[in-house]
Amino acid sequence: GAGVSQSPRYKVAKRGQDVALRCDPISGHVSLFWYQQALGQGPEFLTYFQNEAQLDKSGLPSDRFFAERPEGSVSTLKIQRTQQEDSAVYLCASSIMSNQPQHFGDGTRLSIL
Amino acid sequence: AQSVTQPDIHITVSEGASLELRCNYSYGATPYLFWYVQSPGQGLQLLLKYFSGDTLVQGIKGFEAEFKRSQSSFNLRKPSVHWSDAAEYFCAVGGLDQTGANNLFFGTGTRLTVIP
């Protein structure tokens, strides 16, 4: 597609369940970023991929969060044993190179009950 | 440490009036600066960016921003606001780190309301 695509758009899960969020970056974009946006806040960096390599995961809030991009294209953000504080919008962004502007998807709104 | 401050949480302007949204940043090296706009339920759309060169940058939808290094500011302006400009506006700072990533640090946003 023409833009960054994220699925699902909305996800509701019970506390303790595992969730997986998908990101389809713009074709040919080398760099991929995940951000977490809490209600009323700006996005906060979670992790960064260059092709299939995860070069920075310093923003992941706990070891329950895991991200992968095995073939250097689609990426999945997985959250294990979800907790209520994980409720947020998860944004994916890609850029053709790391020093170029990032293009954002519409996000996945995650609600943990 | 990197940070972005947007001092105005909410601004209301009349349609046709001018607009200025403030942004101050803290960054240890030469910053890359961005303004993004977010409509409800949507992702972020890039309005404009500053990497280097001319400190007055033009963006989409008639927006412009001026980089002032001495003030660590990157304020967004528009001479005449349209009702469709109502949205949340985010200022962000970034720059290549040791991994080659251009991680962005965002402010908390300014919500713009436009009244007829």
Image (tube, coloured by chain):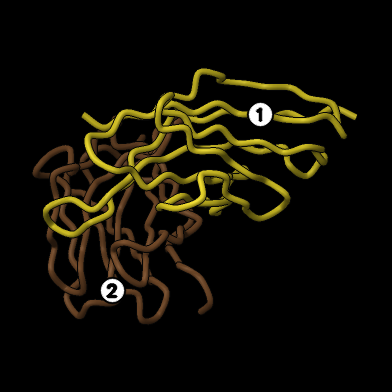
Q: Residue at x 41, y 51 (%)?
A: A11
Residue depth check, mark 1 versus mark 2: number of the one nearer the observer: 1
User: Which residue is situated farthest in the left direction here?
Assistant: A63
Q: Is residue B39 left or right of residue A106?
A: right
Marking on residue B102: none
The type of residue carrying mark 1 is Glu
Q: Is residue B27 left or right of residue A91?
A: left
Position of the C terminus of chain B by quadrant: top right
Q: Classify A108 as above or below B77.
A: below
Identify the element where label 1 is drawn: strand
Q: Residue at x 45, y 31 (%)?
A: A39
Binning the other alpha carbons within 10 Å of mark 1 as few (below 14), some (14 to 19) or many (20 upward) gives some
- Chain to which mark 1 belongs: B
Q: Quadrant of residue A76?
A: bottom left
Q: Which residue is at the front of the view, B74 or B100?
A: B74
Measured from the top left, where is residue A53 in percent x and y? Answer: 13, 69
**In the rendering, what colour is chain A?**
brown
Q: Which residue is at the front of the view, A82 or A31?
A: A31
Q: Is residue B22 left or right of residue B20?
A: left
Q: Classify B3 as above or below A22.
A: above
Which residue lies under the disc numbered 2? A30
Measured from the top left, where is residue B25 in percent x and y? Answer: 38, 29
Q: Residue at x 60, y 29 (%)?
A: B21
Position of the N terminus of chain B by quadrant: top left
Measured from the top left, where is residue A102 in percent x and y? Answer: 41, 59
The type of residue carrying mark 2 is Val
- Chain to which mark 2 belongs: A
Q: Which residue is at the front of the view, A112 or A64?
A: A64
Marking on residue B20: 1
Q: Residue at x 17, y 48 (%)?
A: A65
Identify the element where label 2 is drawn: loop
